[in-house]
Image (tube, rainbow, N blue to C red):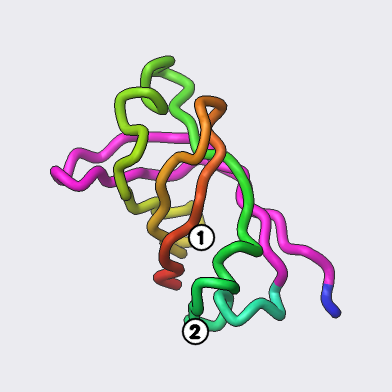
Amino acid sequence: MRPVERLKGTGVVTTRRGKEISVQYHITFAPDDPAATGDTPASALKAFSGQVWCPYDGSFVCVHSGQTMTLRMEDGRQLCFSHSNRDGGVTVTKWIG
């Protein structure tokens, strides 16, 4: 089993209406996870954890709670997520790659 991969940095979230918002993120997943290779059964997506928040807008999480959005990370990888709690915790719904 390989070590867990931790990704953090500044990214861009695109809302379902197409608005782009600069955010900070911390995402963790196991590289051997099928989600990391693009094969994303629902059970594999549970291996993702982390937070996405906007340091410039304290209401970002509350305003977009329950919405599926896309995160584009610094390295170009993307994933679809929704917030799972008020602290910015996320549930990953789709790994785009």
Mark nearer the viewer, 1 or 2: 2
Q: Secondary structure at mark 1?
A: loop
With respect to residue 42, does 68 lie above or below? above
Is residue 78 positioned above or below 24 on the image? below
Residue 23 lies in the magenta-colored region: yes
Q: Earlier in the sequence, mark 1 or mark 2?
A: 2
Q: Is residue 7 above or below residue 62?
A: below
- Name the residue carrying label 2: 39
Viewer-proximal residue among 75 and 35: 35
- Give whichever of 25, 61 is nearer the camera: 61
Residue at point 55% right, 83% down? 37
Residue 28 magenta? yes
Residue 75's disc is: 1
Using the numbered discs, state the Cα–Cα distance from disc 1 to disc 2 in whole angstroms: 20 Å
Q: Residue at x 60, y 81 (%)?
A: 34
The amino acid beneath tag 2 is: Asp
Within 10 Å of disc 1 (Cα), the crowding (few <14, some 14-19, many 20+) is few
CB atoms of marks 1 and 2 within 8 Å? no
Q: Amino acid at mark 1?
A: Asp
Q: Residues within 10 Å of mark 2 (few under 14, many from 20)?
A: some
Q: Which residues are magenta?
A: 3-30
**Could you tell me residue 13's position as x and y percent?**
34, 44
